[in-house]
């Protein structure tokens, strides 16, 4: 007689090999073919991958120059000839694409023959939301890249999955068709907007009931659930969870440690965004691999100069599957460091050495020094009795701190230490306001941000 585990594996193979491909065909997505190709190209040597990038880049730029009004005009004005592109370094002859440029040229960035464009927007957590469009080719490639990365960890589409997420776009789409699809795919969405004790109790209970093979969500949300279960003395490491995928926020070391310890599984970090695409994902050997078949990543300094491996700067992305609405040299606002090592896993895909976070995760001292928010976070994490916190740098002269203290916290001593150490880093004349609150709400997207600077960017 076939056991429950075997029946579950058979169903996973049915979904991954039949049901999901059927869904993608009905959507007119080329996801299956792209994923199959990616599972071959990931083992190519770096030189061959670089040649593929150059070929696809030349194709994208030629298409944009012929069929996208914005780029047709830009290339004519600058004398840029896409046919002369020989390597990704030739991108440096083009200006950056920014959110301001997209807002001002949304219609002329659409390819003239584009069909089936879907309207998307970012959450606008650091300012005005960005409205842009995505074609079927881009969707197929992003889904295929995520599918490939999922399989690196021994799980597949169709395995039981718990998703802790908070995007209004996903949650707003929970209609009957989507609910049915999620049920067939064995995916359950747990809304991460509120992390009250009662909601955390419910999340822990539901995960224990579902016994998912994989988790997916914000690192802040998964670590909160994990810590809540640990505080309640509830085991989560005996549920058969094989991996926890985290994305959309900076993953801190203590979050990784908490998730791994409580759920008894490795943590796989992913980096991407709704506008820039599926950019990088961690493999079981620890390499943060770029999706080089689809994206060209440049790291640039504050003057826009391209940096080599080891240099920290802003991530600029050219997505090679965006012919319908091109993202060419798109400034993401995120910061990272490229790596020049080869991963022990044997994949030829290039890697990121470090993802530092968004520009607004950094703070600026009165003397102009820019530092990561961790410089302030470490002070708060070293104080006993702080259950949660948030730092908002309002200006060079004012930084606010919200604390959720528990009974073990000496609030007066904590306030004095925070003021003393923050002033040492930001400037002696900086005003530090520390407020105690009962609860720190998530952003509109459901994310929890430890540091928000309104001046560092």
Image (cartoon, grey):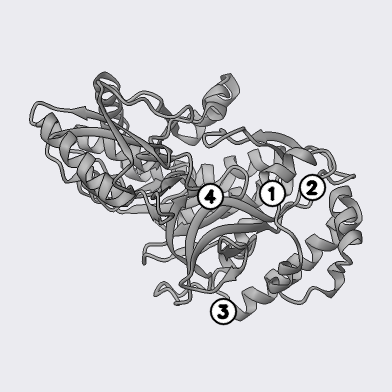
Q: Name the residue under label 2.
A: 324
Q: Closest to the observer: 83 or 299?
A: 299
Residue contact at pointers 4 and 3, CB within 8 angstroms: no
Please tell me whether mark 4 sits on a helix, a strand or a loop: strand
**Picture residue at 48% right of the left edge, 60% below the top:** 336
The CA distance from mark 3 to mark 2 is 30 Å
Dot 4 or dot 2: first in sequence order is 4
Dot 3 or dot 2: first in sequence order is 3
Crowdedness near tag 1: few (<14), some (14–19) or many (≥20) residues, C-alpha within 10 Å: many
Dot 1 or dot 2: first in sequence order is 1
Q: Mark 3 points at which residue?
A: 45
Question: Which dot, 4 or 3, sits closer to the camera?
Answer: 4
Residue 28 in view, yes or no: no
Q: Closest to the observer: 279 or 239?
A: 279
The dot on residue 272 is 4
Crowdedness near tag 4: few (<14), some (14–19) or many (≥20) residues, C-alpha within 10 Å: some
Please tell me whether mark 1 sits on a helix, a strand or a loop: helix
Q: Name the residue under label 1.
A: 138
The CA distance from mark 1 to mark 4 is 13 Å
Which residue reaches farthest front? 429
Q: In which quarter of the image is the N terminus?
A: top left
Residue contact at pointers 4 and 2, CB within 8 angstroms: no
Residue contact at pointers 1 and 2, CB within 8 angstroms: yes
Q: Quadrant of residue 74?
A: bottom right
**Picture residue at 51% right of the left edge, 25% below the top:** 171
> Is 26 left or right of 36, judged from the image as shown?
right
Count of numbered tags: 4
The CA distance from mark 1 to mark 2 is 8 Å
**Picture residue at 27% right of the left edge, 35% below the top:** 224
Question: Which dot, 3 or 2, sits closer to the camera?
Answer: 2
């Amino acid at each position: 007689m076939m056991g429950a585990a075997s029946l579950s594996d058979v169903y996973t193979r049915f979904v991954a090999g039949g049901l999901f491909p059927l869904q993608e065909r009905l959507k007119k997505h080329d996801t299956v073919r792209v994923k199959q190709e990616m599972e071959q190209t990931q083992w190519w040597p770096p030189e061959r991958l670089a040649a593929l990038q150059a070929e696809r880049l030349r194709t994208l730029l030629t298409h944009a120059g012929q069929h996208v009004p914005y780029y047709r005009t830009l290339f004519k004005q600058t004398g840029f000839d896409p046919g002369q592109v020989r390597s990704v370094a030739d991108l440096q002859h083009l200006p950056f694409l920014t959110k301001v440029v997209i807002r001002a040229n949304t219609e002329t960035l659409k390819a003239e023959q584009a069909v089936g464009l879907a309207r998307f927007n970012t959450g606008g957590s650091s300012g005005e939301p960005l409205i842009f469009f995505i074609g079927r080719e881009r969707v197929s490639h992003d889904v295929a890249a995520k599918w490939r990365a999922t399989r690196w960890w021994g799980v597949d589409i169709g395995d039981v999955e718990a998703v802790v997420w908070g995007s209004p776009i996903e949650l707003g789409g929970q209609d009957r068709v989507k609910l049915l699809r999620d049920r067939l795919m064995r995916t359950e969405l747990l809304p991460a907007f509120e992390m009250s004790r009662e909601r955390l109790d419910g999340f822990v209970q539901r995960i224990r009931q579902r016994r998912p093979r994989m988790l997916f969500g914000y690192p802040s949300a998964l670590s909160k659930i994990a810590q809540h279960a640990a505080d309640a003395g509830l085991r989560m490491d005996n549920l058969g969870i094989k991996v926890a995928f985290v994305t959309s926020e900076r993953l801190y070391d203590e979050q990784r440690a908490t998730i791994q310890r409580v759920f008894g599984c490795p943590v796989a970090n992913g980096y991407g965004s709704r506008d820039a695409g599926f950019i990088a994902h961690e493999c079981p050997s620890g390499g943060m691999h770029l999706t080089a078949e689809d994206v060209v990543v440049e790291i640039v300094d504050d003057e826009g100069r391209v940096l080599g491996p080891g240099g920290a700067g802003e991530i600029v992305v050219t997505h090679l599957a965006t012919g319908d609405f091109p993202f060419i040299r798109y400034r993401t606002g995120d910061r990272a460091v490229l790596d020049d090592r080869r991963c022990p896993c044997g994949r030829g895909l290039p890697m990121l050495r470090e993802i530092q976070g968004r520009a607004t995760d950094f703070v600026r001292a009165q003397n102009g020094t820019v530092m990561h928010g961790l410089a302030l976070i470490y002070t708060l994490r070293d104080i006993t009795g702080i259950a949660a916190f948030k730092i908002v740098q309002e200006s060079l002269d004012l930084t606010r701190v919200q604390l959720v203290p528990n009974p073990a916290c000496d609030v007066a001593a904590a306030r004095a230490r925070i003021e003393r150490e923050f002033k040492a880093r930001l400037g002696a004349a900086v005003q530090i306001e520390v407020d105690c609150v009962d609860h720190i709400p998530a952003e509109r997207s459901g994310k929890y941000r430890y540091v928000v600077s309104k001046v560092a960017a």
